Image: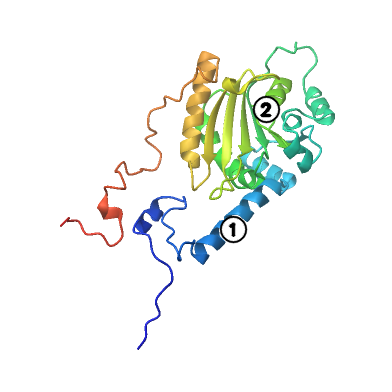
Amino acid sequence: MNTKVSPVTANPWETLRQFTDARIALGRAGVSLPTAAHLAFQLAHAQARDAVLVALDVPGLSQSLNAVSGKQTCLSLHSAAADRTVYLQRPDLGRRLDDASRETLEGLKPAGPEPSVRLYDLAFVVVDGLSALAIEQNAAPFLSVLQRRIAAENWSVAPLCIVSQGRVAIGDEVGELLGAKAVVVLIGERPGLSSPDSMGLYLTWMPRVGLLDDSRNCISNVRPAGLRYEEAAYKLHYLLSQARQRQLTGVDLKDEALADPERLRVSEKNFLLDHSRTPGASGSQA
């Protein structure tokens, strides 16, 4: 009886694929990729393109965030980039609000305080960035976890803002107009071929238009398959506390938080040497 032989030559490192989403040990068919690996790559590429182009569901996101905060409906704002095409071609316009959004925020300030007076300790700005999918999936559950950490502390929080067609720096203008001492921008990161749903967090002390990137602290790849919500909230809470105490963020503020005792335990063993985690491996070596 003839046995059909697979045209795919397996890679001996194939067992390592359980530890990473990276495209390793795919095998080969002749001198080419196997068909399954090639099709999986095309699918991932299509998902990344969709993540960049799909519009943010602002009403749905507002409802989710409102359920978390328990406050009034979130403020819906827009950058100076009129649409997605302009946003991708003109990054500078994504860093500033349009006139209508600016007027909305200016109208929230009570009469009397000088522009330099900060009315709130903290503002959260949720921005679509380069992946609306990342924001729709991760923003509300992450803020729910963070809220539990800061609830017992004396933080006065500004109205939550959602910005369409925005870049990271747009948080500086929003925070300044709201009168916030610190602003946290939750933004969809540039999609990768294994991570179209990655969210980034950017913290800035005393936000104002014109700040450079060295004034911010960044926590990236926040998602269930990346940096989990509990760990990201722990890191951000530490940075927020230090920023308020030292009144600064950016290159002068380092993430020196100790390991969070409440986060899920992660094995510290080197997976390359931990043979017990390799399917089919025996505990002894010949």
In the visual, does 21 lie left or right of 216? Answer: left
Q: Position of residue 103 (x, y in %)?
A: 83, 26
Residue hosting label 1: 42
In the visual, does 248 lie left or right of 56? Answer: left
In what quadrant of the picture does the C terminus appear?
bottom left
Q: How is the image coloured?
A: rainbow
Residue type indicated by callout 1: Gln
Q: Please name the residue shown 53% across and 50% down the image.
A: 194
Position of residue 252 relative to residue 140, above or below, is: above
Q: Nearer the viewer, residue 59 or 40?
A: 40
Q: Please name the residue shown 79% across and 12% down the image.
A: 112
Position of residue 8 relative to residue 200, above or below, is: below
Query: Which tag is nearer the camera, tag 2 or tag 1?
Result: 1
Residue hosting label 2: 171
Secondary structure of the residue carrying numbered label 1: helix
User: How many numbered badges does the structure rendering display?
Assistant: 2
Is residue 151 something that shows in the picture? no
In the visual, does 189 lie left or right of 103? Answer: left
